[in-house]
Amino acid sequence: MKNLAVVALLLLLTLGGITASHAREKNSDSGRLLTGRVADRQDQSLAGSIVYLSDSRTRSVKSFIVGADGVYRFPALSPNVDYEVYAQYKGRKSDTKTVSQFDTRPTVVINLKIDTR
């Protein structure tokens, strides 16, 4: 009977540790944010630009249509994945920038420039 209680206690402690570890991983995934602004070479916001974000592991692509302020946001990015980001406006494209998994900042700011001439 005593052995059964000890085994049950050890099992509960192990499961509690796994649950706490999983919660920490989940919290770190939800905290990473990529944001920035899309502008032309004269630093004027390019409303209607489309920003593309590519996940280097799955190759899935997310997009964001920029408003009048030129700002884009991609929240809840995994800290364990590299991403590539670029913008397009009327057939023109910005340089492609990389968000590295080794960059540990919770908020990464990348401003994108497009030559509209």
Image: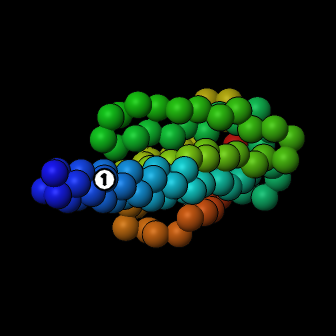
Q: Amino acid at mark 1?
A: Leu
**Spot occupied by residue 14 in the image (x, y as percentages of width and height):** 26, 56
Q: Looking at this view, name the residue that lies furthest to the front.
A: 1
Residue 30 seen anywhere in this rendered image of the structure: yes
Q: Quadrant of residue 65?
A: top right
Residue 62 vertical position relative to residue 94 in the rendered view, above or below: above
User: Would residue 10 appear left or right of 87 to someone viewing this image?
Assistant: left
Residue that appears at 45% across and 53% down: 23
Seen from the viewer's position, the closer of residues 11 and 6 is 6
Seen from the viewer's position, the closer of residues 48 and 107 is 107
- Give the image's coloring scheme: rainbow
Residue 22 vertical position relative to residue 59 in the rendered view, above or below: below
Quarter of the image with the C terminus is top right
Seen from the viewer's position, the closer of residues 115 and 5 is 5
Seen from the viewer's position, the closer of residues 76 and 7 is 7
User: Would residue 47 appear left or right of 63 to someone viewing this image?
Assistant: right
Judge the density around disc 1: few (<14), some (14-19), many (≥20) Cα neighbours within 10 Å: few
Query: For the residue labelled by badge 1, is the local secondary structure a helix, a strand or a loop?
Result: helix
Residue that appears at 82% across and 53% down: 44
Q: Which residue is mark 1?
A: 12
**Spot occupied by residue 27 in the image (x, y as percentages of width and height):** 51, 55
